[in-house]
């Protein structure tokens, strides 16, 4: 209850009132109250962070590293990230002038948008896409412009589609490949035509590459690698997906020095620095070799193969996702909306998936199924989904 | 060995009960191809056997004891350690036997019903072998982890929230 002295009118900002709560929340609430739910709704790895990483973080605390770090993060970590980016993706960045360690890729998206977008400027947001992009753009006063990808083109973005939404007000485009929720990837050949359009219209690129390591058919190609793109690209990534470190909240953002300096101002006033124990854990993750990462990638790939084939056996049409850990099958043949399908599946068969519509334009008619769960759970989920589909066959 | 063969081997090592059909989907091969790989690996004794990891401490009916015994032996001309090793591993109570480097030569893991069973095995069967010089017996008090599997309950529980973006 509010006391009389507290103003009731206009308590909340217009900006926050204009954004909707995430549609995922409703399914979380429903699924949380049920027993024996098999969840394909989890957007994070099912691995626990490798022990050596946890141990290094514990050790840093035992040695007393509990104070703030430099605003952009400890230099050893930034140097290690620079080495990692160069070796793994051939995208070299200066650890001193072009990089900030952030509180998850989420903070990186936020400061990238706030450092570059003026009120009223448009940011093209590829959809289906991660739920945070459009709200973050709106909160910064920008105007998110959804650009839907289509399953006919494996949810890749085409040059023509991109051109069709560009206006004189367009400031930037938010790319997110490998994509959550579609699992779509963009190869060098897919990206190159976009780069021409981006240059022609002098746009910035905010490229969320958090799933880069989880690319199963080709190695990941960053848009920043294309000629002329690095100087207009803000590359966003982090440790959550590849190193199974979601709860640590540790990401990073790389950009040309002027944009990095601008983002650093926001970061230093709002965040000071990323959590110190998390930074020491991440340093160990990068120093300790790639065995754990490779092991996890192989396991995701096997489960991707399994779920795509199993879905086709039970009659769910599903393109093979090239990355991330999501399958995004079409449920249009059932005649149900994605909300109806997901709710029915949860209530009748106790399998949690996320309806495609929460990921924006083009997501309707699909469901997101995370295969980052045990094989045993996947097998049971497929069996239950098959029963659900037979029951509701039209 | 080819990549898919290695993958199959790693999958069955982790879970010997995985269906051939499931495995086939996981490694993106036909079922008959996966079956052929398994047959080949079984025939070549690369896959030696399929077994479960059992925590017998939870089974009241079975009050067994396990010991690790360090054994020093004199190697024999021509056969080295192999002959004495064979004489030891033939005993059914011997669960595992390794030739090791360091202060002793053979590491014997043995199961018995009681401590005196094991004491009897060491004094009557093991120590009496001609080439055995000395033995040191360690009784196992608790298993924390075996064959890569942690025995503590709750270790593998999914601690993630049920639906997340």
Image (cartoon, coloured by chain):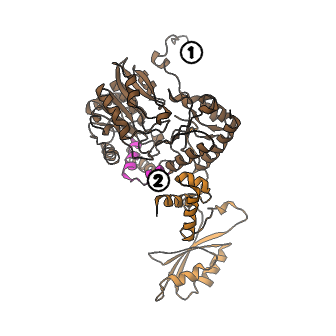
Circle 2 chain: A
User: Which chain identifier belongs to the orange chain?
Assistant: B
Left or right of A117 in this view: A304: right
What separation in Å lies between label 2 and label 1 (alpha carbons)? Answer: 54 Å
Left or right of A292, for residue A119: left
Q: Is residue A289 magenta?
A: yes
Q: Residue A298 placed where, x, y %? A: 48, 51
Q: Secondary structure at mark 1?
A: loop
- What label sits on residue B90 in the rendered view? none
> What's the magenta region?
A276-298
Q: Residues within 10 Å of mark 2 (few under 14, many from 20)?
A: few
Color used for chain A?
brown
Tell me the subunit letter for badge 1. Answer: A
The structure residue drawn at horizontal position 55% and vertical position 67%, both measured from the top left corner, is B40
* Residue nearest the observer in this picture, A12 or A134: A134
Which residue in the structure is indicated by mark 2? A295
């Amino acid at each position: 209850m509010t006391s009389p002295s507290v103003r009731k009118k206009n308590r909340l900002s217009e900006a926050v009132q204009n954004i909707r709560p995430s549609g995922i929340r409703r399914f979380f609430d429903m699924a949380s109250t049920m027993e024996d739910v098999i969840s394909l709704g989890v957007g994070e790895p099912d691995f626990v962070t490798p022990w050596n990483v946890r141990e290094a973080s514990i050790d840093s605390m035992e040695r007393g590293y509990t104070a703030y770090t430099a605003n952009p993060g400890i230099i050893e970590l930034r140097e290690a990230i620079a080495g990692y980016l160069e070796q793994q993706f051939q995208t070299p960045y200066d650890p001193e002038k072009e990089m900030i360690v952030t509180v998850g890729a989420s903070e990186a998206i936020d400061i990238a948008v706030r450092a570059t977008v003026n009120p009223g400027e448009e940011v093209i947001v590829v959809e289906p896409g991660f739920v945070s992009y459009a709200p973050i753009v709106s909160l910064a006063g920008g105007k998110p412009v959804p650009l839907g990808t289509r399953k006919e083109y494996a949810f890749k973005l085409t040059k023509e589609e991109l051109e069709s939404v560009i206006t004189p007000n367009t400031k930037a485009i938010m790319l997110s490949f490998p994509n959550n929720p579609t699992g779509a990837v963009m190869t060098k050949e897919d990206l190159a035509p976009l780069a021409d359009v981006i240059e022609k219209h002098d746009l910035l690129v905010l490229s969320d590459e958090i799933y880069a390591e989880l690319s199963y058919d080709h190695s990941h190609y960053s848009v920043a690698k294309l000629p002329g793109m690095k100087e207009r690209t803000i590359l966003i990534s982090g440790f959550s997906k590849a190193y199974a470190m979601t709860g640590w909240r540790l990401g990073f953002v790389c950009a040309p020095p002027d944009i990095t300096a601008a983002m650093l101002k926001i970061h230093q006033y709002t965040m000071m620095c990323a959590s110190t124990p998390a930074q020491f854990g991440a340093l160990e993750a990068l120093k300790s070799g790639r065995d754990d990462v490779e092991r996890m990638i192989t396991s995701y790939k096997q489960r991707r193969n399994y779920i795509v084939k199993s879905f086709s056996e039970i009659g769910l049409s599903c393109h093979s996702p090239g990355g991330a850990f999501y399958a995004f099958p079409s449920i249009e043949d059932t005649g149900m909306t994605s909300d109806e399908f997901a709710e029915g599946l949860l209530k009748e068969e106790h399998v949690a998936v996320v309806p495609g519509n929460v990921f924006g334009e083009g997501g309707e008619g699909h469901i997101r199924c995370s295969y980052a769960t045990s094989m045993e759970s996947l097998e049971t989920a497929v069996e239950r989904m098959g029963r659900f589909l037979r029951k509701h066959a039209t | 060995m080819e990549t898919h063969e290695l993958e199959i081997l790693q999958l069955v090592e982790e879970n010997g009960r995985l269906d051939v059909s499931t495995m086939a989907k996981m490694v993106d091969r036909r079922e008959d191809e996966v079956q052929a790989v398994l047959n080949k690996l079984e025939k070549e004794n690369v896959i030696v056997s399929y077994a479960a990891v059992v925590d017998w401490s939870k089974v009241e009916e079975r009050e067994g004891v396990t010991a690790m015994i360090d054994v020093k032996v004199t190697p024999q001309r021509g056969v080295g350690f192999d002959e004495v090793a064979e004489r030891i591993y033939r005993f059914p109570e011997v669960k595992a036997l390794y030739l090791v480097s360091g202060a002793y030569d053979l590491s014997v893991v043995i199961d018995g019903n009681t401590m005196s069973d094991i004491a009897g095995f060491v004094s009557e069967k093991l120590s009496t072998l001609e080439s055995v010089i000395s033995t040191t017996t360690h009784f196992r008090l608790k298993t924390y982890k075996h064959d890569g599997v942690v025995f503590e309950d709750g270790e593998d529980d999914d601690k993630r929230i049920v639906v997340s973006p």
